[in-house]
Amino acid sequence: MLVMTAAGLQAESSKSDGTEVVITLQNGLIQAMQQGQKIGYSGRLKLLTPIIQQTHDLAAIIRSVLGAHWAKLNSDQQQAISQAFQENSIATYADRFSQYDGEQFKIVERTQLPRGRILVRSQLIRTDGNPVNFDYVMNKTSGGWRIINIVVDGVSDLALKRAEYNAVLQKNGIAALIDMLEQKTAYIEQSHQ
């Protein structure tokens, strides 16, 4: 399996059409699934951390999820929520992509979106023949194309997070949201011990 290094990905993605970033992510996910039981959760976490950091714009995602709330946070709060969000995002990938049963990703198409963004459509082809559709919304950054939203079978991850996080923020504030993310990450970690 081809898994590019962070430096290689950055150089490649700056001159690409964005599909290479999705392919790099998906190759990493397949590798995590294939090695899943052998390397365990901590091994998958170690494998996927640099891949997620280089293929996703996690800072832009959390700013978008929080919307107007982001500007109301001081820099320490922004840093704390960004860190908790990154750790939870990577832990979730390491948790969900843990077993391999012959699945393969396939790029379906690339479409231009408004505001200079692109959509990379792909499918996870399962052995039962029922594909799972993954639509990656990509934004061009100074480091190249990065994922800013994933729509799985028509459900936007960004929209789900926005609804969940804003409900916590409005009811209990930023400290409660940070605590919630840290607890979710800790729960994932504990479930693999």
Image: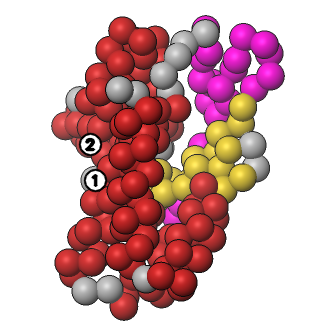
Counting the numbered discs, the total is 2
Are the two marked residues, 1 and 2, in contact with CB atoms closer than 8 angstroms?
yes
Q: Quadrant of the C terminus?
A: top left
Q: At label 2, which amino acid type do we have?
A: Gln
Residue at the image point whose x is 72% and y is 31% from the top: 132
Q: Quadrant of the N terminus?
A: top left
Horizontal side of 38 relative to 110 (left or right) equals left
How many other residues sit within 10 Å of disc 1, few (<14), some (14-19) or many (≥20)? some
- Residue 46 in the image, given as x and y percentages of width and height: 26, 30
Residue at the image point whose x is 36% and y is 37% from the top: 189
Q: At label 1, which amino acid type do we have?
A: Gly
The segment highlighted magenta reads: 102-131
- Residue 119 in the image, given as x and y percentages of width and height: 61, 50
- Tag 2 or tag 1, which sits nearer the N-term? 2
The image's colour scheme reads: secondary structure
Asked if residue 109 lies in the magenta stretch, the reply is yes
* In-front residue for pair 134/68: 68
How many other residues sit within 10 Å of disc 2, few (<14), some (14-19) or many (≥20)? some
C-alpha distance separating marks 1 and 2: 6 Å
From this viewpoint, is residue 44 visible? no
- Residue 54 in the image, given as x and y percentages of width and height: 31, 44
Q: Secondary structure at mark 1?
A: loop
* In-front residue for pair 92/183: 183
- Residue placed under numbered mark 2 in the picture: 10
Q: Which mark is residue 143?
A: 1
Residue at the image point whose x is 46% and y is 26% from the top: 29
Q: Quadrant of residue 121?
A: top right
Q: Quadrant of residue 141?
A: bottom left
Asked if residue 116 lies in the magenta stretch, the reply is yes
From this viewpoint, is residue 46 visible? yes
Q: Secondary structure at mark 2?
A: helix
- Residue 53 in the image, given as x and y percentages of width and height: 31, 46
